Amino acid sequence: MEKQYQTELSYFTKWKPEYDELVRIAGGISYSAEFPRYAKVAAMTYTMIFEQPVVHEFKNLKVPTVLFIGMEDKTIVGKGRLTPEQQAQHGQYKVLGKQTADVIPGAKLIEFENCGHIPHMEIPKAFAATLLENL
């Protein structure tokens, strides 16, 4: 499961044993009495992502904004529905981070090298230090 979790979701640049707990938590919910509620929330979240994208509203942000981007993040919602060729065209956060920062007035972009989708898990000390510097 770890290889599938790492490869298909592209969350991390390299799998570490401490990530096994994330897989256990994510998979464990399916055995819980709370699974129907979790499934409903997940369905509502994905409905919102597909039907109410906020990317066109970024230009309207009026608050100070800091974007933290893992440069190796290749996360794509609906990745399993794309061909490998299509996947290669999307989820390119090296580009998306800059594009997003350019649209948000006064945004600051912080890019983490050799890091995937979850910097606070993959490089917790560097992430925490950078976060505190930017509060």
Image (cartoon, rainbow, N blue to C red):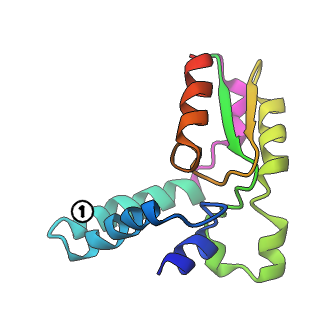
Q: Which residue is mark 1?
A: 37
Which amino acid, by three-letter code, is at mark 1?
Answer: Arg
- 128 and 39: which one is in front? 128
Query: Would residue 26 be found to the left or right of residue 127 on screen?
Result: left
Query: Would residue 96 be found to the left or right of residue 47 on screen?
Result: right
Q: Which residues are magenta?
A: 51-62
Q: Is residue 13 magenta?
A: no
Q: At which x and y percent is residue 52?
A: 58, 50
Q: At which x and y percent is residue 108?
A: 74, 24
Question: Residue at left 40%, top 62%?
Answer: 22
Query: Would residue 19 be found to the left or right of residue 103 on screen?
Result: left
Question: Residue at left 21%, top 76%?
Answer: 31
- 13 and 53: which one is in front? 13
Please tell me whether residue 12 is drawn above or below residue 102 in the rendered image. Answer: below
Query: Would residue 5 be found to the left or right of residue 112 on screen?
Result: left
Q: Few, some or many C-alpha atoms within 10 Å of disc 1 (few <14, some 14-19, many ≥20)?
A: few
Image quadrant occupied by the C terminus: top right
Q: At which x and y percent is residue 77?
A: 61, 64
